[in-house]
Amino acid sequence: MMQRLTTKLYCGFFLIPATVILAISSYSVFSFWRIDSRIGTIYDDRVIPLQQIKNISDAYAIQIIDAVNKANSGLISTNAALNTVNRSIETISTNWESYKNTELTREERELVNEIDRLFLPAQNRITELQQALQRGNPEDLAAFDGQLYDVIDPLTARLQELIDLQLRVASIEREKARAVLNETLLLFGLLILLSIVIASPLGYFLSQSIANTFKQTIKAISESSTEIAVATEQHERIATEQAAAVSETTSTMDELGASSEAATQQAEAAVTGAKKALSLSESGQTAVNSTLEGMATLQDKVEGIAQQILRLSEQTNQIGNISQLVADLANQTNMLALNAAVEAVRAGEHGRGFGVVATEIRKLADESQKSAQKIGTLVSDIQTAINSTVMVTEEGTKTVRSNVDVAQKTAEAFLGVKEAVNDVVVNNQQISLNIKQQTLAINQVLEAMNSLKQGANETANGIGQTKKGMEQLKHIADELESII
C-alpha cells in the first residue's frame, strides 16, 4: 500500500510535471534551432553575398571607370591607374568565387551563368586597358572612354538584379523565421492550455486516490495497535519472569568465576617452577656445549700438530736425501781430484800447479763427505724423535676424540632433559591458558548475564512505554479517520 502511495505521489508531483516541462523545453530548443538556422541562412547566404556582389559592382562601375577617367584627364599617372585596375580585378575574382561557393537558388544560378558570359567581353576590354596603361601613353586611353561602358553596364545591371534577388530571398527567409516564431508561440499557448485542462481533473483524481490510501492505512494502524496492546501485556509479564531467572543465573556464574581464579593461580605457580627447571637445563646444556666446543678446538689443534710433524718428517727425509747426494758428490769429486793429481804428475813441471789445485779439491771433498755424514747422523736422530712425537700425538688425538664423544653424549642427555622440561612448561602454559580462557569466558558470560538482566529490565520498561504509545497511536488514528 505504501508503495502504491509513493508511486501516486511520484506521478502527481514529479513525473507528470517533469514530462510536460521536458516536452515544452524540447520543443523550445527545436524552435530556437530552427529560428537560428533561418537567421544563419539570411546572414551567411544573403547578407555576406550581398556585400560580395556590391564589391564586384563597385570594382567595375566605380574603381576601374574612375581610374581610367582620372588617368585620361591627367589627374593620376598611368601606373597608379594600372595598380587600381589590378587591385579591382583581384577583388572581383576573389569575391565572385566566394559567392559562387555559397548555397544558390535556381534563379541565382541562372543569373550567375549569364554574368559569367558577360565577364568574358568585359575582361577582354580590361586586358586591353591594362596593356594601354602599361605603355604609359595617356592618349591611348581616349579609345576606352565609351567602350568600357558598353561592356560594364550590362554586367553591372545583372549584378544589380542579383543584389535585388538577395534582398528578396532574405525577405523570404525572414518571413519563414517569423512563421517559426508564430508557430512556436501558438504551440506554447496550446501546451499551457492543455496542461491546465489536464492538470485539474488529474489533480482531483490523485488527491482522492491518496486520501483513500490514507484512510485504508489509518484503519490498518488502528486495528494493529489494538492487537499490539494485547501482545504487549503478555510480553511485559514474560519479561518480568526472565529478569528473575537471569538474577539467579548471575549468582551461580559469580561462584564459578571465583573457582576459576583459584585454578588459574595454581596453574601459574606450576608454570613458574617448570620454567626454573627449564632454565637450569638450558644452563647445563650451555656449559656442555662450551666444553664440546673447547674439545673440538683442542682436537683441531692436535690434528694440526700431527700434520705439522708429518710434514717435518717429510722435510727431514728430504734433507737426508740431499745429504746422501752431497756425500756421493764428494766421493766423485775425490775420485776426479785423484785422477787430476795423477795426470799432473805425468805432466811434470807443466802440471805442478794443477796438482796443487787437485790436492785442495780432494781436501774439500773429504770435508764435504764428513759434513754429509754428520748431517745424516742428525737427520737419523731427528727422524727417531719425530716418530716418537707422532706416536704421542696419535695417542693425544685418540684421547681428545674419546672426550669429544663423551661431551656429545652429555650434550644429547641435557638436550633430552631440556626437551622434557620444555614439554612440561608448554603443557603447564597450555593448562594455564585454558584456565584463563575459561575465566575470561565465565567473565564474558557474567557480563552477558548482567547485560541480559539490564536488557530484561529495560525491555519491561520499554514494553510499558510501547503500551502507552500504542494507546496514543490508536487515539491519533481515530482523530485522522474522523478528519479524512
Image (cartoon, rainbow, N blue to C red):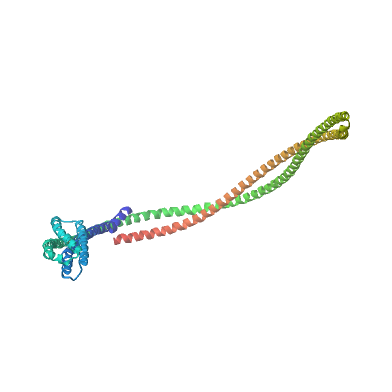
Relative to 72, residue 208 above or below: above
Left or right: 146, with 290 as reference point: left
Where is residue 31 shown, x and y percent of the image?
22, 59
In the picture, the quarter occupied by the C terminus is bottom left
Relative to 223, residue 75 above or below: below
Residue 301 appears in view: yes
Q: Residue at image x 47%, y 56%?
A: 460
Judging depth in this view, the residue of 230 and 188 nearest the camera is 188
Where is residue 315 shown, x and y percent of the image?
79, 35
Judging depth in this view, the residue of 73 and 135 nearest the camera is 135
Residue 179 appears in view: no
Where is residue 394 shown, x and y percent of the image?
79, 34
In this view, the residue farthest toward the bottom is 75
Left or right: 430, with 9 as reference point: right
Q: Residue at image x 39%, y 58%?
A: 470
Judging depth in this view, the residue of 5 and 344 nearest the camera is 344
Where is residue 268 shown, x and y percent of the image?
66, 49
Left or right: 332, with 431 as reference point: right
Q: How many marks?
A: 0
Q: Residue at image x 32%, y 53%?
A: 3
Q: In which quarter of the view is residue 215 placed?
A: bottom left
